[in-house]
Image (cartoon, grey):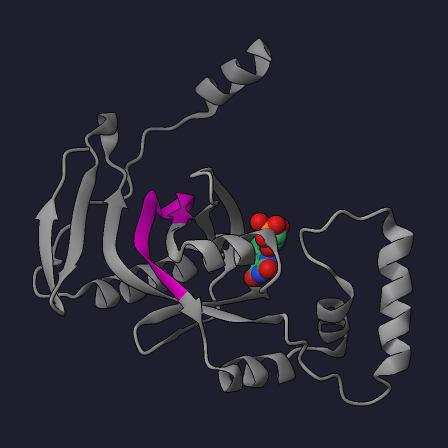
Amino acid sequence: MKDILDQFRLGHHDFDSGKLEGFEGLDPYDLFELWAKEAINNKELEPNAFVLSTVNSNGQPSSRVLYLKDIIKKQFVFYTNYKSKKGEEIAGNSKVSMLFFWPDSSRQIRIEGVCTRVDSQISDDYFNSRPRGSKIGAWASHQSDELTGRDELEHRVKMYEEEFKNEVPRPGHWGGYQIEPLSFEFWQGRPSRLHDRIIFTSSKGLWDIYKQNP
Ligand SMILES: Cc1cc2nc3c(=O)[nH]c(=O)nc-3n(C[C@H](O)[C@H](O)[C@H](O)COP(=O)(O)O)c2cc1C
């Protein structure tokens, strides 16, 4: 392990991709869009992947990577299984956080907010746009439940292939969530750990902005 830690240390380069400036007058959604466009231009791997953290009834947080699929009425949308671990945790505590990390741009964005289910029509529309294999997968995977083996999963895939020969309806346990942001942090890596950070917090529909120490 020591070797690996040494390699990590030697492989680390100081962040030096630019400064966080010119944000005056922008709202956090404008800045998010600008950075997302730059993440795409910088050829970040999986730029729409983010880490979602939820908390269980014991106060234990857990995190996993998801894809951002839409922004609807200023809410960040992803799709998943409502009965999954994250689904259960959101049902018990709707406060969540999202984290985007775009290493080639030396940037991270942290968002804290409240998570609710999207309208079923939105989930239907998205589900219907997916390839057949993904639709069958949504039925076959009992996401986050224990699996006895690959056979169990493949058996259910076959079962649903048989059951839904033509159209595959959206399972009631599968759909979208939307996150309403209450705060954003935009972090730009700078040399010598003197990074730029700005925080937007929501107050009565307006955004307060301040800088934070790195
Ligand atoms: C790049 C990437 C994107 C992912 N996107 C999704 C997604 O959009 N929805 C989803 O349910 N799981 C997605 N996953 C899988 C999740 O990370 C996770 O394993 C799964 O949702 C089960 O999480 P849970 O048991 O905490 O509920 C993705 C994983 C990776 C690595």
Q: Which residues are magenta?
A: 100-115
Residue 113 at least partly seen? yes
Rendered location of residue 46, percent (x, y): 52, 56
Viewport quadrant of the N terminus: top right
Q: Residue, x 40% and y 48% (percent of image)? A: 102
Tell whether 92 sits left or right of 88: left
Rendered location of residue 96, percent (x, y): 38, 53
Task: Please tell me whether residue 74 is drawn above or below residue 42 in the rendered image.
Answer: below
Rendered location of residue 88, percent (x, y): 54, 55
Task: Please tell me whether residue 88 is drawn above or below residue 132 in the rendered image.
Answer: above
Is 156 in front, or is 48?
A: 156
Viewport quadrant of the C terminus: top left
Question: In the figure, residue 28 lies in which quadrant?
Answer: bottom left
Q: Residue, x 31% and y 53% (percent of image)? A: 111
Q: Residue, x 24% and y 30% (percent of image)? A: 191
Q: Residue, x 91% and y 79% (percent of image)? A: 162
Residue farthest to the top, as pictured:
2
Residue 30 within the segment the image draws in magenta: no
| Predominant SS along the magenta part | strand
Task: Please tell me whether residue 109 is drawn above or below residue 6 in the rendered image.
Answer: below
Residue 47 at least partly seen? no
Tell whether 124 sits left or right of 43: right
Dividing the image into four equal quarters, which quarter contains ligand 1?
Answer: bottom right
Tell whether 129 sits left or right of 68: right
